[in-house]
């Protein structure tokens, strides 16, 4: 019997997180219908647990990026790398 991996959980840090942190969790949850599960982890539930807001995310399996890297990487560096991969190379572009 194959079992689904346990879901991921995100919370705002601290006992009294700033409203902006809670707003970010709510915003991530609100995007659930806009995200394509082919490339994005899906938010499944936003709930209060033990007095803290908890965002429950689907666990698609695989290995977290943080475990694969030797050192922290700025998010913008990852986005630029992804955008470069998606850009057609000059030898792939057509003149049409």
Image (tube, rainbow, N blue to C red):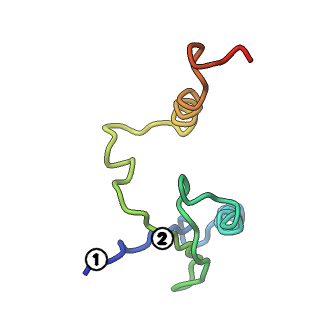
Give residue 38's position: percent from left, percent from top.
53, 55
Which dot marks residue 9? Answer: 2
Number of numbered callouts drawn: 2
Q: Nearer the viewer, residue 49 or 94?
A: 94
Nearer mark to the viewer, of 1 and 2 = 1
Whole-number angstrom distance, CA of label 1 to CA of label 2:
22 Å
* Residue 41, above or below 6: above
| Residue in the image at 71% along x and 14% along y | 95
Determine whether, in the image, residue 14 is placed left or right of residue 8: right
Classify mark 2: helix, strand or loop. strand
Spot the residue most to the left. Answer: 1
Circle 2 packing at 10 Å, graded few (<14), some (14-19), many (20+), is some
Which quarter shows the N terminus? bottom left
Spot the residue most to the bottom. Answer: 50
Circle 1 packing at 10 Å, graded few (<14), some (14-19), many (20+), is few
Q: In the picture, residue 82 is in which quadrant?
A: top right
Classify mark 1: helix, strand or loop. loop
Spot the residue most to the right. Answer: 96
Which dot marks residue 56? Answer: none
Give residue 73's position: percent from left, percent from top.
45, 37
| Residue in the image at 35% along x and 57% along y | 62
| Residue in the image at 61% along x and 26% along y | 87
Determine whether, in the image, residue 56 is placed left or right of residue 16: left
Mark 1 or mark 2: which comes first in sequence? Answer: 1
Tags 1 and 2 touching, CB below 8 Å: no
Task: Give the residue at mark 1.
Answer: 2
Which quarter shows the C terminus? top right
| Residue in the image at 67% along x and 61% along y | 24
Q: Nearer the viewer, residue 40 or 65?
A: 40
Give residue 50's position: percent from left, percent from top.
51, 86
* Residue 86, above or below 1: above
* Residue 32, above or below 75: below
């Amino acid at each position: 019997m194959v079992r689904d991996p346990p879901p991921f959980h995100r919370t705002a840090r601290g006992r009294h997180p700033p409203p902006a942190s809670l707003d970010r969790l709510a915003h991530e949850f609100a995007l659930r219908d806009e995200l394509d599960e082919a490339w994005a982890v899906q938010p499944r539930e936003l709930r209060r647990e033990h007095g803290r807001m908890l965002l429950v995310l689907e666990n698609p399996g695989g290995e977290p990026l943080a475990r694969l890297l030797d050192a922290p990487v700025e998010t913008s560096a990852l986005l630029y790398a992804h955008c470069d991969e998606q850009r057609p190379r000059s030898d792939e572009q057509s003149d049409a």
